[in-house]
Structures are given as structure tokens and as C-alpha cells.
Amino acid sequence: MSETTEAAVETHDDHHPSDWEYIKVAIILAAVTAAEVATYFESVFTFFETRWILLTSLFTMMIFKGWLVTRVFMHLKQDKPVLQQSFFAGVLLATAVYVVALLAFNVFG
Amino acid sequence: MATATAPATDTHHDAHDPHATNTGISNNKLAMWLFLSTECLLFGALISTYLIYKTRGSGEVLPTDLFDIPFTSVSSFVLLMSSLTMVLALSAFGRNDLDRGKAWLLVTAMLGAVFMGGQAYEFTAFYEEGLGYTTNPAASAFYTLTGFHGAHVSIGIIMLMSLWVAANQGKLTGKNSETVEIVGLYWHFVDLVWIFIFTVIYLIPPE
Amino acid sequence: MAIIEEPLALTSGEQHAERPLGVLTRPQANGSWKDWVSTVDHKKIGIMYGVAAMFFFLLGGLEALLIRTQLAFPESGFLSADVYNQIFTMHGVTMIFLFVMPFAAAFANYLIPLQIGARDVAFPRLNALSFWVWLSGAIFLNTSWIVGGGGADCGWFCYSPNSGITFSPTNGVDFYAIGLLITGIASLVSAVNLAVTCLNMRAPGMSLFRMPVLTWMLLVTQFLLAFALPVITVALLLLLFDRQFDSQFFDPEAGADPLLWQHLFWIFGHPEVYIIILPSFGIISEVIPAFSRKPIFGYSFMVFSGIAIGFMGWGVWAHHMFVSGIGPISVFAFSMATMFIAVPTGVKILNWLATMWGGKLNFSTAMLFAVGTVTMFTIGGLSGVTHSLAPADTQQTDTYYIVAHFHYVIFGGGVLGLFAGVYFWWPKVFGHLLDERRGKIHFWAMLIGFNLTFGPMHVLGLQGMSRRINTYSSGFGFEFWNLVATIGSYILGASVLYFLWNVYMSKKDAPNLPAPGPDPWDARSLEWSIPSPTPEHNFDEIPVIESQDDWWFRKYNIEDDGSVVRISSAEDAAQKGDAVGVHLPSPSFWPLVLAIGLPLIGYGLIFNLWLCVVGGLLTGGAIYAWVLEPVDDPDAGAHGHDDHHDGGDPDGELATVGAAGDDTEGEG
């Protein structure tokens, strides 16, 4: 890891996306949020009454939103991989540990 | 194992480059990212606590009974858009466009404040419906989780306003736009946590 | 916490020789107390950690002796049950949070920058903050004896609902919760700081896989701390809210689940075990090669097994809870994980043995302590594996067998290793050796006392003697071994006092003895390439690293036929420590001021909310004062900023604005 990152020290790529790209991403985020909220209106979108469809769609949309925010707004797309690695180490560790803990409490039924 | 090799790569540090670190990332930014990754464990514990307790009310009112999804959707949307304005502020500072940068900082802080206003309204409404902090484990867990998130947003607002003041005093310019970026990372993370909370706590209905 | 400071310029001294900078006007070792309270020097901070931790070691040891005195004879009335509960709780809390962790932090602070070839840590002022916040939390925790109506009485694990107001009506548990929150902030700040230091501040050529094993183990420890502390932070806050604001997290009558605390506590608690043990593993991985005259056997295995322990440490927490009714699937899964975690630990033990195999062994005091660590930890590790078998664990839970096991791990594996480090690095830190003859007496007394104290507890536990009970009846066969354990504990206590005597006498004798020179042990890592004691600026010139054990290869050459030839004496190869004008960060009082605010907030939460306001203002004010204070003292050198900022941008002050809030956030 260090060898590659050290080699990359010289290449300074601080070039961030343009404002318009940020706005496009925000529009996508807003649209996905709207879709998320739509699941609340089960009477309109009746297929969300099926629980596994609801959960799958909600989690997919949530992860997609989080992915966009970290990649674009937090610049993980351009930044050094070590940042992504250390952050996702925390995310994955937290997910694994707490899912196991919740399983022990039978939270998932 | 111990054969002497040539110096690894061309890593002669230029002392005049603040980015001359082994990873090529400034200490400040790396520290913020590490801090944010530890925050995942903090919020994870609070969210898990709520998930374990969300149905534990012994006959009393539960937070899930009171959720006002359309209202929370609006405040979630506000926080989401504050991430956009934050990144626009950074972009402006990066171009050394200070006026626009300051304006976006202010807008971001204000959107954050609107979100906090929404939380204050939500807490008040819930309280009036009979859900106090000490009513039951579900209530305690809900208020603690969202309150913690709110505290993070508030600290973010303080940091944004401090940046705004510094920019007005001429201490914050395009040269140190990384400061804006680092505060931005914090702000986006707080937004990220809310994306998670909004889905897991609010949108997933009780079975 | 992400207070933003500039990276230290990794420049050579010569480059700045024509432009003496601020540091030279700084008070340097003139003995003034201001030197110490305002220092941002990682070495002074390390020493302060060590001294303060040693004080709490004596305090925790005193508590241990009280426990053993009470248990020397059956049906003793020396301590009441209530006082006994407080004493054993505070003994555990003190030894873990106020002795072993900060003592390891002393090594981390002092040695990480030296071993990677840096002038200081990444954030020197934050480093000072970590120490002062830790100390303020430690003092706060112990003031509960005076103003809190006694110490916490719920055990260091503080299970609910025993920790609730109903069963623990004094303020002891509040002091426990707030005190550990404060020390937790310190450890978290320190963890991020030192992790960034390891990742970012290495000398040219010092790739990650050329770092000494000690630095590697400390890096893994920092990551464990960074990820584990938020979990206990949440648990402690929930406990505090329950006690102070009547929330319902741990009240079973309201429908709360007492197991929530147990899970949160042990999700933190098991990584904590490795936080305690890994620094010691790192230390003996430096000591054993030096005194075996061989490189460490299987460097990459050592590193990767350390990382593996770090990861797997997260998957075994519920083996502390086998009897709490977590269900057969959980028990099975955590049993398996617990068995597997013995593998990387075994790899380490094998590698230490292989390092010694065929080496020219020199049993100095440091080496004796290191070998003692390996053997005692092996005993503790083996009794640990017996707990992975859930049926056996069910028999052993809450007996003295457990007490024996974790003392063999924490004292045998952790503390003995730390003492190995004390004897090994003492000359580097203080410029004179600790007397070897007295050191060896210290070692044998400690080893014998330790084994006499904790060895019999295996027997007592298997006989069924319960832990945490203030007395026992005669006639169960507990008398003999309890008396042996008590005698052992007094020998152990005496050995610690004898160590302090050795420190005092060695200091007194030092002027009459030859100076140890830069490299008294003919060792392998970078800290031995600079004078003893370490100069203020560490390195005259930042070394360019060409291999693992770079310093050793500056003294020796391996010929084509494999023979080792000395090419330079340590004195010739070492730096002289005479560089002038090296740029160092300026001292600051604000870390101390900020740290004083936190316990005030704590007292406020317990006694009077107005104190919170005072503490909050002090802390908040200190944060802003800190932010506005330039990293480099402008009075100390006119060109401070230009030194490493093209155009001298004032970002040192400004950059900190943003991070200011993070500190307040740590207070929860």
C-alpha cells in the first residue's frame, strides 16, 4: 500500500468536478429521495406492501445515495485510495459488528 | 529479508510543500477521515440501541406511532441539499471566488439551521403527544439517537459560521480552501448519517 | 479533534542553520514547571504519561493489596462488603485505564516518532491535549473517593442493572462514567494523532513494511482504540443518561434489556484486551532481537499476525457472555472465533522463540522481562483457550480461574512487557542505565510474587471460589491458597517499590558511571542512532532509510559468505545531536486549559449544572484561543511561517477554525 501511494505523491490531481456536475448529482439524490418517500404511500404503489420488495428497494436506494455522497461530494473518486480504505474500514466494521449484535437480540425476527 | 535496497521511491520530501507526507494527503484531512470512520462505530451503537428498543414501550406510545413521514422527508431533503451548497462553497473557494464561497457557506449553515428547527418542532410535537425522554426505552433511544445527530449538525453549523467569520476577516482564502474541504467532509458525513437514519429509523415501517 | 496543524517540516537542520527559529528561545530543559505544562514535545509528553501512569500503578496496587489483605483469611472483617466492592472496582478501572493504557501511551508517544524518523507527532498540540485530558479524567475519577460518596462499586465492567441508581445510590458510578468518557476522549484524540503520524510522517524510504514491529503493533493499537472507544462512549453515555436524566436504557422493569450494556461493553472490551497486550508484544519484539543478536524472525508474519489479532479481536466479544443466555448459535459462533484467535497469537510466540533460537543470548534485565512476558503470556493464553469451550467456561465463569487467567494475560503479558521496555529504553530517555543487578532482583521478585499471587487462583477457581465476593467461609479448602496468594501479592508490591528504589539509586549513581552512549544495547532501530538522552529536535538530519533495521546496517555489513562484519562503531555512525535552528512547534497552554474545563463539566453534571456552564466556557474559550493562536509563536521567530509555507499563509490559525467544534463534540 505504502509503495504505491508514495509513488503517487508526485501526481497532484486536485481537480474536482465542476459545479454543474455537483448539481446534477444533487438532482439525482433528490430524485432518489423522492422515490424513497414514495414507498411510504403504499396505497399508491401497492407492490411496496410486499416486505422484501420494500426493504430491498429502500436499502438499495440508501446505499446508492451514500455512495454518491462519498464518491462525489466527499471526493473519494479523485482522492487517494487510502482515505476510502480507512473510511470503509469503519463503515464495514460497524456494519459487521452491529449486525451480529442485532442478530443476537433477534431484532430481525 | 534485510538486504539493503535502493531508496524505495522518489520520496524526497519538499519541505515547502505542506502536502509532502508519505501518503500524499495532508495530516489534517487524513485525521478527519479517520475520525469520521470512528464516528461510524458511534452512530452504529446508537442506531443499534434504537433498533433493539424500538418496540419496547410497555403499552405506552412509541416513536414509530408518531412519525410524520412527509414532514421528516422535507427536513431530510433540506439537509441533503445543504450538502450540495457545501460542495459549491468549496468549489468557489477553490476558484478563489470568495464572495460566492462565503455566500454558499452561509446558505449551508442556514439550511442546517432549518433542519435543526425541524428537529426542534418534531421533538416538541412528540412530547405533546405524550412521548417524553423518560417515557420508555424506545423513546429514550429515539431522542438520544436523533439528539446526537442534531448535536453533530449544530457543531457543524458552528464550524461553518466560524469559517464564514474567518473568510470575512480575510483569513480564509483560496489558499487554505482545504479547511473548507475538511469542514465539508464533516458536514457530508453528518448528512450521510441522516441518509441512513431516514431509511432505517423512519421509512422502514414496523411489521 | 481534528484540530488542524501543519505538518512538521521534515527538513535537515543544516538547511535552517542560517535562520534560527522560534524553538531556540523556547525554555529548554531549564527545569521550569512551565516547560512541562506548556510542552508539545512528544518526548516530554511521553515522560509525563509514564510518571502519571506509575503513580496510578501504585494506587491500583494499593487497592490490590487491600483486596488480598481482606482475603488472606476466611471471614475477615478488614473491609466491609460495600467498601470491598468499591476497592475491587476501582482496582480494575485504575489498572486498565489509568495504568496499562497510559503506560503504553508513554511508549507510543516517545518512540513512534523516533522509530519512523520524525521530529514530532502529526499534531503536537493535540498530543499535549491528549495527555492533559487523560490526566484530568484520571484525577476526576479518583475524586469520587472524596466527594462522590465512595468509588464506583459495580466492577470495572459495571453491568446493568447493578450500575443503576437503585443498586448503586452513591455517585461512584457517575464518576466512573464521566471519568472514563473524559479519558476516552483523550485516547481517541491520541489514537487518531498517532495513526496519522505513522501513516504520514515517516522518514524518506521508511515504507510501512520497514517500520519496526513495535511501531506496527502500536499502529494497530491506535486503530483498535479509534474504533473501540466510540462504542464504550455510547455505553457510558447511556448509563450516564439513565442515572442523571432518568432515561430508560437499562431499567428491566421498563422493558429495557440488561444485555444491551453487556454487548456494548464487550464489543469495546475485547478489543481493549488487545489494546493492552499489543504494545507489550511490540516492545518485546524489539528487546528479544537486540539481546539475541539476530533480526526478528519472520518480520512479515509478526506484522500480519498483529493485524490479524486486531481484526479478529472484534469477533469474539460474546465469549465474555456465555452464561448470559445469548443462545446456542451465538455461543457456537463465538466459541469458534475464540479458538481461531489463538492462531495469530501462537504465531507470535513461535516467532519470538525462533528469534532466540541459535542467537547469542544476553539475559539483561530487559531480556529477562521479555522472556518472562512470553512464558507468562503463554500460560494466560492457554487458560484463555480453555474458555473458548463454552461448557468449561460455564463452570469457570465468575470464579477465580477467570481472575487468574486475565491477570496472566494483562500482568504477565502486558505489564512485564512494559517493564522490559522500561529497562530497555531508560538510557535513551534519561541518559543513564538502570542498574542491572538491582534490575534482576526486581525481575525475579516480581516474577515470583506474580506467580505466587495468581497461580493459586487457578486452583481456587477450579475449587469453585467465587470472585467479587468480599469473603469466604472456612472449611471449603480455600484457606491455604488464599494465604499463599496474599503473601505473593505483598512480594509483588515490594518488587514494585524496589523498582522505584532502583530508579532512585540509578539516578544517584549515574554521574559516577560512564555514559551509556547512543546505542548501549547495540540495537537495531532508529532511536539508537541519536544521542542519549534524545535531543529536543530528535534528529539532526532526517535519515534516509534503505532497509529494515537500517540503523543496524549502518554498523554492520553482511559479507558474501554470510559473515557479519562491523563497519562502524555506534558512536561514529550515530548523529551528534548538535544541530541548531531546527524548526519545532511552539509550546501552548491551551491544551491544559481545555483539559481543566472537562472535569468541571463532569462535576457540574453530578452536582450543579452551573458548573457545567463554567466548564463549558473554559473549554469552548480554550478551543477558540487555541484556534487563534498561531502554531508557531510569532514572537519566537519572525520567519516562522515562511519556513514551510510558500507565501506564508496564515492557515495554521485558520485551518483550526473548522476543527474547533469537533472537540466540543467529544464531550458528547
Image (cartoon, helix red, strand yellow):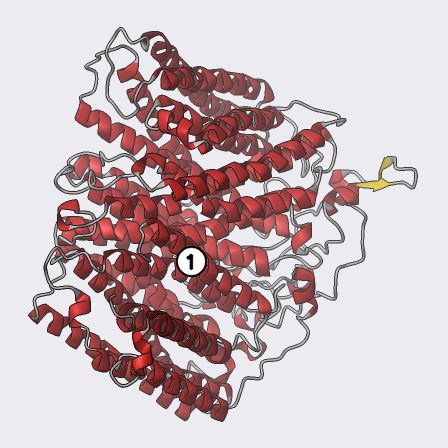
Horizontal relation, residue A102 to residue C243: left or right? right
Give the image location of residue C420, x and y in percent.
56, 30
Q: Amino acid at mark 1?
A: Ala
On the question of residue C145 being in view, the answer is yes
Is B169 placed above or below C87 here?
A: below
Of residues B189 and B62, the one nearer the viewer is B62
Which percent across, then down, holds residue B131? 11, 65
Task: Please tell me whether residue C186 is drawn above or below residue C70 in the rendered image.
Answer: below
Say which of B207 and C626 sits in front: B207
Q: Could you tell me residue B135's position as x and y percent?
A: 11, 58
Is C145 rendered above or below residue A109? above
Residue C17 picture quarter: bottom right
At x 44%, y 90%, the residue is A23
Give the image quarter of residue C58: top left
- Residue beneath label 1, please? A94
Q: Quadrant of the C terminus of chain B?
A: bottom left
| Quadrant (top left/top right/bottom left/bottom right) for the N terminus of chain B | top right
Viewer can see residue C49: no
Between C518 and C174, the one nearer to me in the picture: C174
Number of residue marks:
1
Indicate whether B48 appears above or below A22. Answer: above
C476 to the left or right of C246: right
Characterize the local packing of mark 1: few (<14), some (14-19) or many (20 or more) Cα atoms within 10 angstroms. many
